[in-house]
Structure formats: C-alpha cells, structure tokens
Image (cartoon, rainbow, N blue to C red):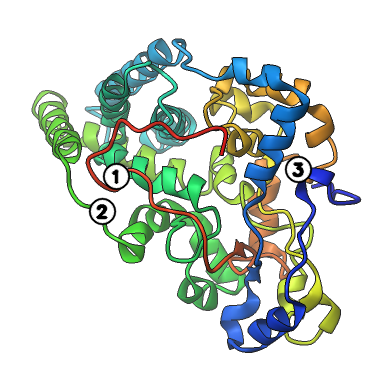
Amino acid sequence: MTASPKLRAANKTPPVDQNKRVEDLNGGDDYDKFFWTYTEEPHKTRRQAIIKGHPEVLKLCGPEPLTIPLVLAVVSLQVLSAYSLRNQPFISWPVFLTAYIIGATANQNLFLAIHEITHNLAFKSPLANRLLAIVANLPIGIPYSASFRPYHLTHHKSLGVDGLDTDLPTALEAYFLDSVAGKAFFATFQILFYALRPMFVYKLPLTWIHGLNILAQVAFDYALVKTCGGKALGYLILSSFLAGSLHPCAGHFIAEHYVFSQGSRSREVKTSHSAKLAPAPEETYSYYGILNLLTYNVGLHNEHHDFPAIPWTRLWKLNEIAKEFYDDLPCHHSWVGVIWQFILDKEVGLWCRVKRSEGGRKVGAGAGHGQPIEITS
C-alpha cells in the first residue's frame, strides 16, 4: 500500500472538539482501539467535489446490460461443474481443487454480481434486478441476496456508523481475535462472520422478496440433489465457503475498509497523546490489480463508494476522468498480500476500522426494495 502524503482538499477533516475526542478515547478501554471519528464519511464530500469539477461523470451512471449474460454464464459453469463432479468422492483432491480454483472464483464472481445488481445496475427495472440477484444466488447454495441488499445499501449510507454498518467487526470479535491465530481464524472463516454478524447487529423485517429468494433456492437445491446427488450441492457450498476463505479473490473483503497504512495508531491510542488528537485515517482503499477482471472491478472501491450508481464497466473511466482525486489516495497492490499482512502484522487487525457513533440511516429495511441508492447527496 502507498500512503497519501497529504489529505486531499475534498477530504479535509473539519474541526472537532479535541477535548471531547481525548475524553472519549480515554473512556472505553479496549473498545477505543478502533479509529473513532466525529466527521461524516468522506465519499459524499469527494463525490460533490468531483461532480463540481467533472459534471460529465454523471453520464457514467446507469445499468450495464453486460452483467446479465455474465451472470447466466457463471451460473451455468457452476451447474456444469457440480454435475461433472457428481460421482467423485466428496473428500478428494479433484473436488477440492475444482472447488478452490473454479468454484470459489466463480462464486466470488457471483457474490459481486449480486453486489452490482443490489445497486440496480443490471436492469432499469428494480424488480428485474431483484429477480436476477436470485438467479445469481442459486450456485451459492444458501439464500442471501434479498437480505444482502438492505444491509449493503445501509453500509453505503452509514459507512462506519456503529450499530448500522454491519461490515464493521464488533468489539467482541476484535478483542477475542486479536492475535495471529485469531486473525488467521477470521480470514479462514470470514464468510461466516459476514453472513452471521448482520443478524446480531439488527434484524430485518421479512418481505415477499425474501420468501421468493428462499423458495427459489430450496427448489434449486432440491432439484440438484435429486438429479445429481448430494455431492453436487456439497460442491457448490464448498465453493462458497472457499470463496470467502483463504482465496486470492477473498482479499477484497479485508482490503476495502481495514486500515493498513496507519494501523499502528490503534496500538498507540492508550499511550500517545498526539495519536489521540490525529484525524482518522482513510477508511476506504482501492486495488487496481488484475483480479479485478474476475470480480466486477470491486477493487476500485473508493470509486464505487463515491459513485455507487456507476457500474463496474465504467469505474475505470471515472478513475481516469477524476484522476486528481484518486492518484494520491492510499491503495493496495495485492489481495494475497493483504491477507498475509492482516494475519501476520501485529499492527493490523480487526481493531483497524474507522468508526463513528452517529449519522447514516437504514436503507431498504422494509418493503421498499425498488429504491435506488442516491448519487448526489
């Protein structure tokens, strides 16, 4: 990662009550190892600055139809792979290697297809997007697309807000996993943390789209088991687990919002007065490497949070147009390196997240599943 030499004009931290900051940082023992900030999330500010300087970026917003055939192709690939392995012993190298190399990559691709579709970026119709997300969900084996949408849109509207942003680790997770072994456990089973944590933060009301998601998934799983056997379904679920485990593409989960370049401040927060007064570090990081080709350019994560209505095929264009806003931001160069450093570096861990105690709002928690995310506020 390369650290930014200075804060960009669009991201300057407004004045805060430093006495309150020090008092709060001193008041909560280990809970205060997070990077607490009292400013709004940076993406709204940068988005407004980019639109002011480059209004043409708004023309990049809107659906990308290419997502539709790609989803269908990857779904077909996984169904074909499951069928091909139906007679293989489940605990065998052919199954494991296929699940790791092909299956995990394919299902990670489908995770991120659902992420794109969540932002209404496949069809113009919100309902069509919801239905395509359910189709993309099928090879994952477990229904989640309907629940992912409101949690993820809330993550955008409430970035870093404690109690709303379910992407944030809890203090309990950070405390008990604050070791090399603990971080290795988290990195290995992170898909389970992301699946289960939201339900402990706040619960969503069930809607008809949740019911359809569950019904379609159960019907698909049943049909697969009846026609290909239980090993075929086992392959798909194993692929989903490996997609969120120690897999190169899974590095994006950690790379996106964990603080690396200034991670040491979380350890100094008890002892360094100057560290307590320092503004929070950058809280979103991009990756511009080759694995973006397999993951809907999710590595361009600052760009995505700045303009969530710009689809994956146009994020590079956004970066090119507004390069003066992105060139100096810290970024990652390797998702494998991110996982490696996260586990072994004592200055990096689950505490290394920026949190804020207020602001934000829940999105799509009720029946309003057709509501697109805003891009200008």
Checking the image for residue 331, the label placed there is 3
Q: Is residue 92 visible?
A: no
Q: Residue 118: x, y in percent?
A: 39, 32
Q: Within the image, what quadrant is residue 133 found in?
A: top left
Q: Amino acid at mark 1?
A: Ser
Q: Position of residue 316 (x, y in %)?
A: 69, 22
Q: Residue at x 48, y 14 (%)?
A: 64
Check disc 3 and report its element: helix, strand or loop: strand
Residue denoted by label 1: 147
Nearer the observer, 290 or 99: 290
Question: If you read the primary sequence from the N terminus, does the residue marked by circle 3 or circle 1 appear first?
Answer: 1
Secondary-structure class at tag 2: loop
Q: Residues within 10 Å of mark 3 (few under 14, many from 20)?
A: many
Which quadrant holds the C terminus?
top right
Mark before the other along the chain sequence, 3 or 2: 2
Local crowd size for mark 1, using a 10 Å CA cut-off: few (<14), some (14–19), many (≥20): many
Vertical arrangement, residue 88 with respect to residue 192, above or below: above
Residue 208 shows in the view:
yes
Label 2 with label 1: CB-CB less than 8 Å: yes
Indicate the amino acid at tag 3. Cys
The answer to which quarter of the image holds residue 226 is top left
Q: Where in the figure is residue 374, as x and y percent of width and height?
A: 49, 34
Looking at the image, the residue that sits furthest to the right is 5
| Residue 336 occupies quadrant | top right
Q: Which residue is mark 2?
A: 204
Number of other residues with Cα within 10 Å of mark 2, as a class: few under 14, some 14 to 19, many 20 or more: few
Mark 3 and mark 2 residues within 8 Å of each other at the beta carbon: no
User: Rounded to the nearest whole Å, what is the CA distance between mark 3 and mark 1?
Assistant: 30 Å
Between the C-alphas of marks 2 and 1, the distance is: 8 Å
Amino acid type at image mark 2: Leu
